[in-house]
Image: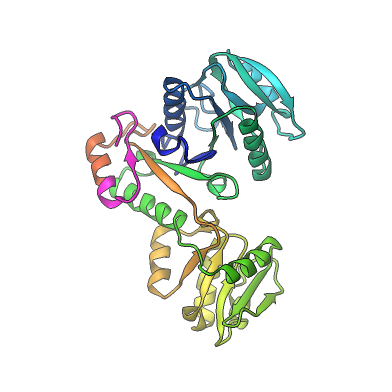
Amino acid sequence: MIELIRGKYNTISIVGMAKNSGKTVALNYLIEEAIENSISIGITSIGRDGEVLDIVTETEKPPIFVEEGTVIATASGVLDLGDANIEILKVTEYKTPLGEIIIGKVRHGGYVQIAGPQRLSEIKKSADEMLDLGAEFVIIDGALDRFSQAAPAVSEATILSTGAVISRDMNIVIEKTIHKVNTLGLPEVEGKEIRRILREVMDKGQIATVDVENKVEIIPIKTALNSGHIIADYLKNNTKYLAIPGSLVKNTLEDLIKSTRKYKDIEIIIQDGTKIFIESKDWIKFVRQGIKIKVLDKINLIGITVNPYAPAGYYFEPKDFLLKMKSYIDHIPVMDLVLGGE
């Protein structure tokens, strides 16, 4: 897996479809490969990882072992919960319920817990500092089923972990994974000038329309939630783009479709694929109805890991699960890291 990253990206996020989808296994696999290749890496997390027992599900979790030279950004309150010897290089101003975030370097290898900054801007700044301190690349570990750290403004590449924990039905797991891959990989809106205009609008958090002559009209609402009917009133015959800087949810699109047919003639632009909160069946329905969605920043999904085992005790036959997932997703490497490679 390290060959997908080394020499190509400075920051990599690992996101999971759900708890126990194999995210920590993917993290440990990358750490082990880095150790084998004598690569110094940085590690942080937008949640908490490395506990022996998951504090939410009370299931056992794989611990995180780090080698000498690894740089970490973690909360001061979890430093004593591992046995690695860590030299504190900096105490940041970033606060968390587990204490301020420190940046340190591992002097003697051992097990650690990682509980990083809570804000994306702090994650990005911490990653940059770890790179300055000698990390060849930084791994940003995800939290629960959050995908915000996959945003291109935070990480340059993303690995997605999926698995049997999502459903006892393998077909449902594959369907939901395909949907996530498709939404994370939505195409970028094209055109230098229109991208500049849309970014300027979105950076201000404004919902707006842009017509064929690139004229902007700001829609005076703070959120698109429950506002599809209001947005519909601003769509004109010459409207080309609708910029929505926040989350895109089912009811916004439903209201839009009920209120006007002009939605078929526009492209809805969102920041990136992490802003979509729509289930796969609804997504397919909207696409069939003519909804077109593009992003300002496309997420760079470079790999998918699959975990055929669920904490509830059921599992899929590992090779069958891997092969079936690969048959549906053939443009991105799909790996079972326990079974062995792709």
> Magenta residues?
325-342
Query: Relative to 210, is 60 on the left or the right?
Result: left
* Foreground pick, 135 / 187: 135
At 70% from the left edge and 71% from the top edge, which residue is drawn? 221
In this rendering, the answer to whether 296 lies above or below 55 is below
Residue most extreme to the right: 93
In this rendering, the answer to whether 342 lies above or below 103 is below
In this rendering, the answer to whether 103 lies above or below 300 is above
In this rendering, the answer to whether 229 lies above or below 303 is below
Q: Tell me where residue 152 appears, x and y as whole percent.
A: 55, 50
Q: Is residue 88 magenta?
A: no
Task: Write down the quadrant of residue 11 in the picture.
Answer: top right
Residue most extreme to the front: 7
At 50% from the left edge and 40% from the top edge, which residue is drawn? 9
Q: Principal SS element in the magenta part?
A: loop
Q: Tell me where residue 250 appears, x and y as whole percent.
A: 51, 65
